[in-house]
């Protein structure tokens, strides 16, 4: 069953079920069971063993704790507690009221969110969750749907990280590129220089970022996103109250009327500053003297840094909470423990989805789904001119099926290097760029991607609402990027490929219609 066509069954079944039923845990659970049965060749005992090892591996690895996964889950709980205390202190309300005086339009709220996403480029997990906390009060006040917020977050997290050399992604990718270059005796360019040259060739990133700003500035909505946006503009409720919202606090908590903007800003600043400081500190500790900035970020323990940042943010939130209790006699210190409990509880849906996604990704890796897809590419007779667009499509399929862009990087970058080395070595960088672009595209579309899960969590959006509403936008960006890769391959010119993307984005901006706000919203938007 391993590395065969059957290895495609579990991810495709899970994805199909999640789209049809909208029940994420049921769909992922089905995919997990089918994966275990395939690995165990129908033997129930062996299948249970594979299943147990996959779940255990989430928490225990190589005889010790899986610190990365445990830190990510712990950070989610910390973030839930911080959010609840900020709400109790009145920070979210005050920040929303302040933002209404500074950010005058729905377009401004969306553009500001996108800018936040671009600025916070250190790690995609941190980006998705931190940007959501800052932007949500602004977008809610301007009646921007949570689905749109999740799209903005998701489209400025991984796309920025994949082209940033000073990020957890950049360090990982540069390491693989270095191995590919060394394997094929390419010595005229370093791995870091190759990465920099690849940046303008990563056409999906530029198509996605361009589309984000067109969508935000021109209020262009299509597909099911238009339904979410229209409902939000009419009702003022940014999500479907009938659906489960990860990170949404369901229990009623009081909110101080004396809250200030600082009650939201300072915990987030502490969270951000603490995380960055911990990243630099851990990177310096693991680096030799004279290490470059990229070496420091490459050696950093990002997961542990999130915990340090989260704890610092929580401490600041607690201090501000007690400041509010001193001002407001109706609030008492017992609310502290209730707020922390309720906040952590609000993150349970996201935590469960993430655990299930990690389990199925582990089993899919054991089935060799990615290797099977990669072998098909390696053994096929490709026209070298179409190699970039083909690698883009294959990487997209692999990341979509496996739910991991990093896994797709690890498998397909060496395969792309082998194909190019055997045909036309001048196509090395375009082919590698296409793999990176396609992997991010597939990751964007996949409902089992951890980045997608955390984007919906950060935005406070139902997970499947995010997946369904983002898909048409991701496919639009992919179509534009795909045409660009065709031009790049035929002309052997990366700048012409980028120019093609820019031209197609301009055509899209000029030919698409704005989503006209319902009349009720036009009258109420600026009371």
Image (cartoon, grey):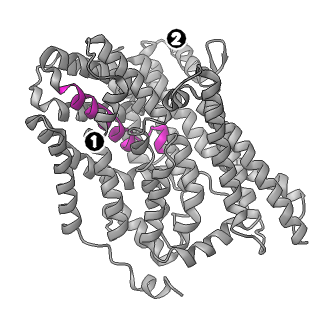
Pick the front one: 393 or 351:
393
- Quadrant for the C terminus in the image: bottom right
Q: Residue at x 65, y 24 (%)?
A: 285
Overall secondary structure of the magenta section:
helix
Residue at the extreme front of the image, as rendered: 290
Whether residue 438 appears in magenta in the rendering, the answer is yes
**Residue drawn at point x = 22 percent, y = 57 percent:** 505
- Residues at circles 1 and 2 in contact by the CB criterion of under 8 Å: no
Q: Indicate the secondary structure of the residue bearing disc 1.
A: helix
Which residue is identified by label 1? 200
Residue 35 vs 29, above or below: the answer is above
Apparent side of residue 171 relative to residue 131 in the rendered image (left or right): left
Dot 1 alpha-carbon crowd within 10 angstroms: few under 14, some 14 to 19, many 20 or more: some
Viewer-side residue, 399 vs 321: 321
Q: Residues within 10 Å of mark 2 (few under 14, many from 20)?
A: some
Q: Confirm whether residue 5 shows in the render.
A: no
Callout 2 secondary element: helix
- 368 lies above or below 23: above
């Amino acid at each position: 069953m391993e590395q065969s066509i059957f290895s495609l069954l579990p991810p495709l079944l899970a994805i199909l079920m999640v789209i049809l039923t909208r029940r994420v845990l049921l769909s992922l659970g089905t995919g997990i069971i089918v994966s275990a049965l395939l690995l165990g060749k129908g033997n129930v005992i062996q299948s249970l063993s594979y299943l147990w090892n996959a779940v255990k591996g989430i928490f225990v690895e190589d005889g010790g704790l899986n610190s990365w996964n445990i830190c990510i889950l712990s950070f989610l709980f910390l973030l839930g507690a911080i959010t609840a205390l900020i709400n109790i202190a009145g920070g979210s309300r005050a920040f929303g009221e302040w933002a209404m005086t500074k950010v005058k339009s729905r377009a401004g709220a969306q553009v500001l969110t996108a800018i936040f996403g671009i600025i916070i480029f250190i790690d995609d997990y941190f980006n998705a969750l931190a940007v959501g906390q800052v932007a949500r009060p602004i977008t809610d006040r301007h009646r921007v749907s949570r689905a749109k917020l999740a799209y903005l977050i998701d489209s400025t997290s991984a796309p920025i990280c994949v082209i940033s050399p000073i990020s957890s992604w950049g360090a990982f990718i540069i390491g693989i590129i270095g191995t590919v270059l060394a394997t094929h005796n390419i010595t005229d360019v370093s791995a870091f220089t190759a990465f920099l040259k690849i940046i303008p060739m990563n056409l999906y990133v530029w198509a996605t970022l361009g589309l984000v700003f067109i969508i935000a500035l021109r209020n262009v909505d299509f597909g099911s996103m238009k339904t979410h946006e229209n409902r939000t503009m009419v009702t003022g409720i940014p999500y479907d109250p009938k659906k489960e919202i990860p990170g949404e606090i369901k229990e009623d908590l009081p909110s101080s009327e004396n809250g200030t903007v600082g009650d939201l800003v300072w915990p987030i600043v502490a969270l951000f500053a603490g995380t960055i400081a911990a990243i630099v500190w851990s990177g310096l500790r693991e680096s030799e003297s004279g290490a470059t900035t990229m070496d420091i970020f490459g050696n950093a323990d990002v997961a542990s840094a999130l915990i340090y940042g989260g704890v610092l943010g929580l401490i600041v939130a607690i201090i501000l909470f007690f400041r509010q209790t001193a001002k407001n006699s109706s609030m008492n210190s017992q609310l502290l423990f209730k707020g922390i409990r309720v906040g952590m509880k609000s993150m349970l849906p996201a935590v469960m989805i993430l655990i299930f996604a990690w389990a199925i990704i582990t089993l899919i890796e054991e089935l060799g789904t990615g290797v099977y897809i990669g072998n098909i590419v390696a053994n096929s007779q490709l026209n070298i001119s179409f190699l970039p667009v083909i690698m883009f499509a294959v990487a997209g399929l692999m990341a979509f099926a496996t739910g991991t862009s990093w896994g797709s990087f690890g498998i397909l970058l060496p395969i792309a290097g082998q194909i190019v080395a055997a045909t036309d070595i001048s196509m090395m960088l375009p082919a590698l760029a296409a793999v990176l672009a396609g992997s991010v595209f597939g990751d964007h579309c996949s409902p089992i991607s951890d980045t997608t899960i955390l984007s919906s969590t950060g935005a406070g959006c139902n997970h499947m609402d995010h997946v369904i509403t983002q898909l048409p936008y991701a496919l639009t960006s992919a179509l534009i990027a795909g045409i660009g890769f065709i031009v790049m391959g035929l002309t052997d010119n990366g700048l012409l490929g980028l120019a093609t993307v820019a031209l197609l984005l301009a055509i899209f901006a000029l030919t698409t219609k704005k989503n006209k706000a319902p009349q009720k919203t036009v009258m109420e938007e600026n009371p």
